[in-house]
Amino acid sequence: MEKLFKRKYPLYYILVPDGISFKNNNIIPSSTFKGSLNYIIKNNLSPIIICPANKFGSNFSEQFIANKYLISNGYNGEIYFFEFDVSYYIDTTMNASILKKNLIKNNFWNINSKCAIITNRYHLNRSLLIFKHFGFNIVDSIGTLRGEKTKGEKIPLRLSHYRIKLIHSVYEFISVLIVRSKIWLKLI
């Protein structure tokens, strides 16, 4: 990943997206996702690698919205993201798989590069499990809290479990069990 940025870094921060919201015909990061983005800004973490993710029927991807949010809120670190246009839902397994393939394809991959995962605290265990499975050298992790909810924001139906913390937590617990089973059965 050294060739990806202006210089070599001791640690690369991989941001796993956490949804978008719609407000007054604008697309913004979900309050869950804003927690991670605000953490990056507040702590001036760099460089950031934003995983490829979803559009939820809109014209803009989660990674594009994240990049726009970071820059418009004063972030001046290095950011890497790419667009990946697909018609299906990209889950966390696909986030890791597509990112790794892109890094290899562009000769950015160095399996020894140290990485930290940043995502919502509920999503963290599943993200760590998956990214480690795909060979990322994860040496640190940051589980963030939700950002402030934007009044009037509407999240995609696919993310309705974000609305209630207990349901979000149970959803992630079950998802971890499913991922562990898929890894054990060598399905991923």
Image: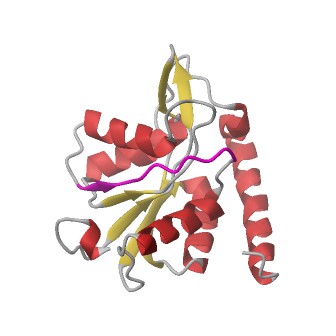
In which quarter of the view is residue 118 placed? bottom left
Quarter in which the N terminus is drawn: bottom left
> For the image shown, how many numbered marks are present on the structure?
0
Q: Nearest the camera: 140 or 77?
A: 77
Residue at image position (33%, 51%) is 40
Q: Is residue 93 magenta?
A: no
Q: Can you name the residue that lies furthest to the bottom here?
A: 112
Q: Is residue 118 left or right of residue 1?
A: right
Q: Which residues are magenta?
A: 78-88
State whether residue 150 is above or below residue 70.
above
State whether residue 18 is above or below residue 15.
above
Q: Nearest the camera: 126 or 90?
A: 90
Quarter in which the C terminus is drawn: bottom right
State whether residue 68 is above or below residue 4.
above
Task: List x then y, in percent, for residue 168.
Answer: 70, 46
Q: Is residue 82 magenta?
A: yes
Task: List x then y, in percent, for residue 138.
Answer: 46, 77
Residue at image position (42%, 53%) is 82
